[in-house]
Image (cartoon, helix red, strand yellow):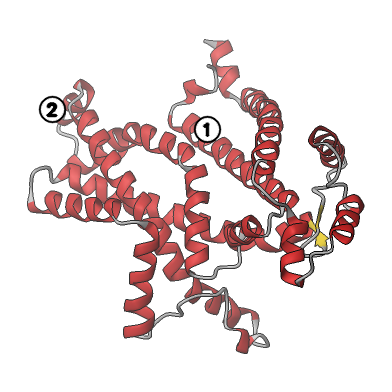
Amino acid sequence: MADAAAERGPGGIARFLARRLAEAVPVFLGIVLFSFFILHLAPGDTIDVLAGEAGTGDAAYLDQLRQTYGLDQPLIVQLGHYFIEIAHLDLGYSIHYGAPVAGLIGGRIAPTVLLMGTSIVLSVVIGIGAGTLAAMARNSWLDELISLVALVAYAMPIFWIGLMLIILFSVVLGWLPSGGFYDAARTAQDPLSRSLDIARHLVLPAITLALFYFAVYTRLTRASMLEVLGMDYVRTARAKGLDRWKVTLRHVLRNALLPVVTMIGMQAASLFGGAVVVETVFNWPGLGRLTYDAIFEREYQLLIGILLISSALVIVVNICVDLIYSWLDPRIVAR
């Protein structure tokens, strides 16, 4: 018992975090290897794109550029150089943008974190609330309505939701901006007004990204709640005369949240994939939009850097999910 308690204490949590961080190292190495070779299977490179934009076909000039940037070397040599750069915390240099990859990503990461964080909060809070109400009102009109809304949100493609929201709230009603991060004409405004302006631009992309995951968490919470409601300890608590909502919030919901929290960690990576689509539709200046542009520009260094940073974000989200999971079920730290 004492050993188990120690594992659940600060020392146990520290060892748990250290173990997870150690597990992240081979994940990063695998991402670098996989993405490096997969990206180089595509025909052409950044120099070909630059040549097309400049309208030049001078083979000697293009070969000189490849030699300058090391693109004429075998892939295994390029990979070795890239590992050395990563060891020095250098993500490389973007030929197309003429800037370090780390700087390009650093300028785009805040909008993506803001979009993903807001979407996660919206989808989780509303999804858990709606799923709880549906489970408590099982087989009623409220249950049917919530299930129908969740089904519709789940069935609609993310890009189509974004386009419909733009048409409704930007074109028809004119309530919200159709894209961008802030109004460029108001760059001199005070910090509070600027924050409110960013919040207005955030509403439609965040709702678009959150709707699909809201549907997932609603359906999962409802199913998990119904399963826990049928357990013996819940019937015992009710037989003792405890208030229905007290039993639900203190006993049922906490145990029903375990699969929901697990799903949050599993869907962190797909959330970034959805952010690529949403940022493109709404011209949101985040990593998703940068990824979209880098693909067409054959920016291998930039793409691998984005993959590494986005993977780091996913790992951080999963570690946070594990900590929440250990709070809901303290036995998880000792496993």
Residue at the spot of label 2: 239
x, y (%) of residue 101? 77, 55
Label 1 to label 2: alpha-carbon separation? 34 Å
Crowdedness of circle 1 by 10 Å Cα count: few (<14), some, many (20+)?
many
Up-down relation of residue 242 to residue 91 (above or below): above
Figure label count: 2
Q: Name the N-terminal-most of marks 1 and 2.
A: 2
Residue at image coords 66%, 35%: 31
* Three-letter amino acid code of the residue under disc 2: Ala
Choose top left, top right, bottom left or bottom right for residue 28.
top right
Residue at the spot of label 1: 322
x, y (%) of residue 49? 71, 61
Q: Secondary structure at mark 2?
A: helix
Residue found at the far left of this picture: 140
Q: Is residue 313 left or right of residue 90?
A: left
Q: Is residue 47 left or right of residue 180?
A: right
Up-down relation of residue 209 to residue 309 (above or below): below
Residue at image coords 19%, 42%: 135
Choose top left, top right, bottom left or bottom right for residue 10.
top right
The residue mark sitting in front, 1 or 2, is 1
| Residue closer to the observer: 308 or 13 | 308
| Residue closer to the observer: 57 or 155 | 57
Choose top left, top right, bottom left or bottom right for residue 240.
top left
| Residue closer to the observer: 244 or 216 | 216
Q: Secondary structure at mark 1?
A: helix
| Tag shown at residue 309 | none
Q: Is residue 64 left or right of residue 2?
A: right
Residue at image coords 60%, 67%: 285
* Three-letter amino acid code of the residue under disc 1: Asp
Up-down relation of residue 206 to residue 15 (above or below): below
Crowdedness of circle 2 by 10 Å Cα count: few (<14), some, many (20+)?
few
x, y (%) of residue 94? 79, 57
